[in-house]
Image: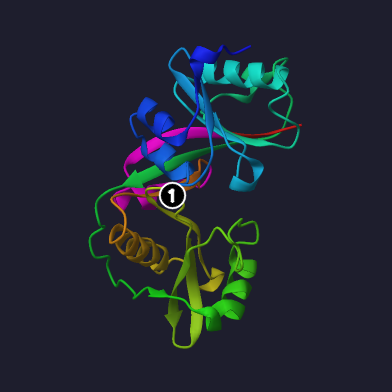
């Protein structure tokens, strides 16, 4: 059980409690109702299901997991809900929470525009006329992507063309106070030519024109992508683990 004196009732209080951390600024959209719970330096907030993952946490992993266990016991977390939590080994959930999925990823952010890249290709904002080519490219090159044409979370799509062909694309999924890149991908036969660097650099500059920071997420097994993002200035990192409750 979590006592009332450890509960925060709105977004502004949550952001103040975590020092306006970039991950919280990203995950908590400006109009998102939220309620947060604190324990021993960890803070976990919950949002209604229509706003994305059920909850996110910042702080030490163990007390964050303890909050999850308490919320599940109180019926405030349900099977099928997703949570982004401080990095932890799945074994720490045994006999505490039953999860159907567990994955590790890093949230990276930068406040500095990347330098020009070798042979950098121009990045353009895509239009409705590009939707068929965009859908085909995502299906071919990133079929597991959660960013798709028509997704209401996407603010804009950006891409790189080779002649009339769309060969790289990425989504602007900014929802909070900072920019956020998602779904970046390059056509399989065009990889190894620096297009990923061009796309990331161009989109980062475009979003920094509207935000003071830009973030992105990358799974820990995608070592090459993580190395690229760090080279482009995404050197600030928050290690996370995502779970889906069974």
Q: How many marks?
A: 1
Residue 91 image offset from top left, x and y in percent: 65, 20
Residue on which disc 1 sits: 216
Quick one: label 1, few (<14), some, or many (20+) residues within 10 Å?
Answer: many
Q: Is residue 40 left or right of residue 80?
A: left
User: 21 or 240, which lies in front?
Assistant: 21
Residue 28 image offset from top left, x and y in percent: 47, 41
Is 113 above or below relative to 67? below
Residue 218 image offset from top left, x and y in percent: 49, 46
User: 163 or 74, which lies in front?
Assistant: 74
> Which residue: 55% across, 58% down?
153
Is 40 above or below relative to 18? above
Q: Is residue 226 magenta?
A: yes
Q: Is residue 93 left or right of residue 229?
A: right
User: 65 or 13, which lies in front?
Assistant: 13
Q: In terms of secondary structure, where does tag 1 sit? A: strand
Is 118 above or below relative to 106? below
Residue 170 image offset from top left, x and y in percent: 48, 64
> Which residue: 23% across, 60% down?
115
Q: For the C terminus, which image quadrant? A: top right
Query: Which residues are the magenta region?
Result: 221-241
> Which residue: 43% across, 37% down?
24
Residue 210, by quadrant, is bottom left
User: 41 or 190, which lies in front?
Assistant: 41
Residue lying at the far bottom of the rendered structure: 164
**Display colour scheme:** rainbow
Q: Is residue 117 magenta?
A: no
Q: For the N terminus, which image quadrant? A: top right
> Which residue: 62% across, 40% down?
48
């Amino acid at each position: 059980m979590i006592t009332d004196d450890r509960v925060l009732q709105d977004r502004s209080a949550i952001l103040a409690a975590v020092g306006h951390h970039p991950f919280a600024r990203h995950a908590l959209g400006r109009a998102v109702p939220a309620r947060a719970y604190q324990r021993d330096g960890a803070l976990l907030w919950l949002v209604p299901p229509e706003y994305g993952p059920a909850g996110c946490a910042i702080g030490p992993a163990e007390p964050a997991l303890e909050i999850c266990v308490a919320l599940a016991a109180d019926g405030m977390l349900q099977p099928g809900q997703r949570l982004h939590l401080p990095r932890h080994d799945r074994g720490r959930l045994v006999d505490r929470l039953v999860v159907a999925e567990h994955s590790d990823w890093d949230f990276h952010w930068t406040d500095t525009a990347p330098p020009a890249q070798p042979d950098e290709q121009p990045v353009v904002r895509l239009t409705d006329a590009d939707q068929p080519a965009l859908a085909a490219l995502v299906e071919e090159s990133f079929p597991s992507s959660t960013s798709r044409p028509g997704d209401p979370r996407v603010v804009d799509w950006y891409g790189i063309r080779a002649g009339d062909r769309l060969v790289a694309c990425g989504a602007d999924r900014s929802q909070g106070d900072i920019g956020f890149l998602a779904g970046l991908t390059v056509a399989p036969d065009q990889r190894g030519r620096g297009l990923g660097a061009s796309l990331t650099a161009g989109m980062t500059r475009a979003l920094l024109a509207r935000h003071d920071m830009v973030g992105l997420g990358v799974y820990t097994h995608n070592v090459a992508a993580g190395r690229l993002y760090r080279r482009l200035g995404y050197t600030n990192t928050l290690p996370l683990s995502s779970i889906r409750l069974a």
